[in-house]
Amino acid sequence: MSSQQFLAVTRLAFKNMVRWRWRLATIFLLVAGSFSLFVLYSSMLSVSAQIGVAQTKELSLPYDLMVMVEEGERIIPEKELPIPRFRRDILEFGEEALALSFYTNFGKQEIYGIPEQSHFFQADTVNLIKGQWLQNTGDMVIPLSIAKSYNLQVGDVVQGYTLNKNGIQFRATFALVGVFEDAYDWQHAFILRSDANQLVFNAQSNRFFVEYDRNEAELIHLLEWMKAAYPKATFLYPTVTLDMGNDLLKQIFQPGQWLLILIFLFMGIGVLTVSLITFLERRRELAVMKSIGVSNAQIVYALSLEQGSAGLFGVLSGMFLIFWLGRRISWFSQVTSSNLSLFMIQGALFTLLVMIIGISFPTILAKVATVNQLLFARNIPIIITKIDHLAKPTGWILYREMKENLHFLKFDMVDGRLEGVLLKAVGDKVKRGEVIATQEMYFGLRYHEWKAPCDGIVAEYNPNSGHMGILPDDQQTPHYPYPEHILQDELHHQKQMEAGRAKARAEKELSEMSIGSK
Amino acid sequence: MSLSDRPILETINLNKAFYLGEAVYAVNNVNIQVMPGEIAIIVGPSGSGKSTLLSLLGGLDRPISGDILINDQSIVKLNEDQLALMRRKNIGYVFQFFNLIPHLSALENVELPMSIASMSRKEARERARYLLDEVGLTPRAHHRPDQLSGGEQQRVAIARSLANRPAVVLADEPTGNLDSKTRDMVIDLFCRFNKTERQTFVLITHDTSLTQYAHRVITMKDGRINTIEVQNP
C-alpha cells in the first residue's frame, strides 16, 4: 500500500467511523465496561486474598504487627527499613523484645523479655488483674490461663533454665509478681529484657513490634515492606475487618473468580455481535468498495482501524473509570500498585484477544467474499477447498487406476445424495481444472469445488458412493503419484489374492479329479 | 491483426451454474468479443443470464469454467487482490441501484477510485470535478447520495466508473431504475463519452429500444448467446 493509498483508506475509515458512530460507541462501551469491571473485580479479589488468607482467625493483639525474626536475621533499625520516605510517618512506635524458651517445673514456656519502659506491654494495656507489673530484676508476670493451669499465684517462685547451642544450662529464679487477663490471643510470660539478656548472654532481639498511625487498611502496605525487610520472618497481626460498607459491587462480586471469565465472554459475544450486524448492514458498501478496486488488505485495514480505535479508546476510558470509581470505593486504596498494574495489563491483553476474535470473523467474511456475494446477500464461504485428487485411495480404486488408468473423484454424499451441484454427467467431456461439482456445507461457510484432474470423458458415476471415474483422453497421462509403499502394498495384496484364488482353483480341480477317479 | 483490432474483452466457453435444488446454468458456454471503442449491449428477458454474465466479466463473481480475457489478460485465475487491482485499472462499474457510498459526497464518491489508485489528492479532485461537470452535476458536488435524485445518483455513478479511465465500463441495467427523461440523459452520457473519449461500454438491459445506440447487440436466452449483431449506431 503506497502512502497515498494508505492516507486515502485512513480518511475513508475515519468517515466510516462517523457514519457508524453508534455501533462503534457500543463496542467502546462494551470494552470500557468490561475492562473496568475486570480490573476492579480482580483488585477486590486480591485485597480479599491478602487479608483473608494471612490470618484465618481474628487476632486481638496490643500492637499492630509483630515480626518474628528468624535466628541469625538482623533487626533492622527503623530508619533503615525499606519504607518509602513519604510513608515513614505511619510507624508510630517500634519496639524490640527477646523471646526465649524457658524450661520450668511446669513445662517449657516461651517467655518474652520486654523493655523496662514498654509501650505495648504494661499494666494498662494488658489489663493486670492481680499483683503488680514488672518493676525489678527477677520479676515475672504471667497470663491468667497459665496461672489457672498450673495453680500458680502471686508471690510464688518460678524456677527454670535455658539452653544454649551447646546444651549448657543457665538457671534462673523468678518471683511471680502479677497475673494479667488473657485479653489477647497469645499467652506468654513476661520478664524484663535485662533478665532475658542474662539468660541468653545478651542475644540480639528477635521480636519487633510496630504500631502505625493510619487506618487498618494500610496494614497491607506495612506488611509488604516488612516482608521485604525480613524475608525469612513470620508475622503476627490482627485480622483487619474488610469494611466494604454497602457497596453494590460487593453484592455483585460474590459469585467468585468465574465472573472474570464471564466478563470477557460477555464482552466477546457483544463485540462479535455488533461487528457481525454492522458487517451485514455494510455488505453493499463493502461490495462497492471492492468493485472500484479497493483491495482486501485495504478493507481489512479500514475495518480494523475503525473497530480497533473503539476498543483502544474503550480501554483508555476504562482506566479513567477505574481511578474515578477507585476514589469512591472504600477498599480500593488497599490495592497495591504492582497488582493494579498487573490487572490493567491482563485486562488490556484479554481485551486485545477478545477484540481480535470479535473483529476477525466479520473481517474474514469481508475479505473472502466476492462482490456479488456481498451485493446479493449470498452465503459467504470461509473455507474453500478445491479438490482435484482422491483423498484416500482404497484398494479397488488403486486397482482400476493402475489397470485402466481411470481417474476417480469422490464427492461428499449425505444419505446417498450429493448436497450440491453435479455439473457433468456420464459421457460428458471435461477439461483439466474444470469444475465438475460444487457443494456448500455448514450454512454456506464451507464450499467445495471438485475439479477435473485431466482432460477426458466422464466414464462412470456411482450416485450412492459419490465416485466419479474419468477416462483421460491421453492414456499416457501419468497415474496419480501415490507413495511407493501404497503401490507396493497394493501389488502385494493383489498377488496374495491371486495366489489364494489359484490355490483354491487347484484344490477344487484336485477334489474333482479324485471324485472322478473314484 | 493490429493491436487495436484485438478485442478488449473476450470470453471463451464461459460457464456459471448455481444450485437451486438442481444445477442451473445461468451462463452456458458463452463466447463473446467486444472491440475497443464499442458500445455493446446485451439484451434478453429476465433470467436469461445477462447480469450473471456481466458479473463474471467484471470479476465480481467467478465462473466454474471457461476464460475471460481483458486486454488479452485472463482474469479467471487471479486471486482476490489481483482482481481488485485489475478492476481498479481496467474496469468501471455502473450498477442498477447506483451503489454510491452513502456517507461520502458526490465529489468524494468520484474521487475515491482515484485515491485508491494512488493518484494525488489534488489530481483526483480535479478529475472528479471535471467528470462531475461533464455529467452536469457541478452544483451538486457536495451533496450526499441521499440528497440526490435517482438520475443524479446514476450520473455520479457513471462519473465514478470513468474516474480511472478504465479499459471498459460495465453497466448493469443502468436505466432500469430511471424515468424515460432521465434514461435518455444517461444514455446520452454513454454515447458522449464513447465518442469523445473512445470509451468502451458493455451495457445490459431488457429495454430493446436502447439497442439503436449500440455497435454490437448480443441477445441472450436461457444462459446461452442467441444472436450477435454488429451494426453502426
Image: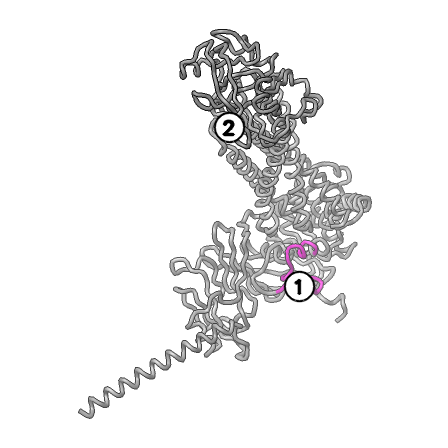
Do marks 1 and 2 share a subunit?
A: no
Magenta segment range?
A: B67-85
Corner quadrant of residue B199: bottom right
Q: Secondary structure at mark 2?
A: helix
**How dense is the environment of label 2, judged by Cα within 10 Å: few (below 14), some, or many (20 and up)?**
few
Q: Nearer the viewer, residue A144 or A223?
A: A144
Q: CA distance from mark 1 to mark 2?
A: 72 Å
Q: Which numbered tag is attached to residue A53? A: 2
Q: Secondary structure at mark 1?
A: strand
From the viewer's perspective, is the residue at label 1 or at label 2 nearer? 2
What is the chain identity of the residue bearing mark 2?
A
- Residue A306 sits above or below residue A394 on the image: above
What is the chain identity of the residue bearing mark 1?
B
Q: Amino acid at mark 2?
A: Val
**Magenta highlight on residue B79:** yes
Residue at 65% x, 29% y is: A317
Horizontal side of A209 relative to B155 (left or right) equals left
Residue at label 1? B74
Horizontal side of B23 relative to A39 (left or right) equals left
Q: Position of residue A342 (x, y in %)?
A: 62, 34
- Residue A456 sits above or below residue A185 on the image: below
Horizontal side of A350 relative to A457 (left or right) equals right
Q: Position of residue A59 (x, y in %)?
A: 50, 19
Q: Amino acid at mark 1?
A: Ser
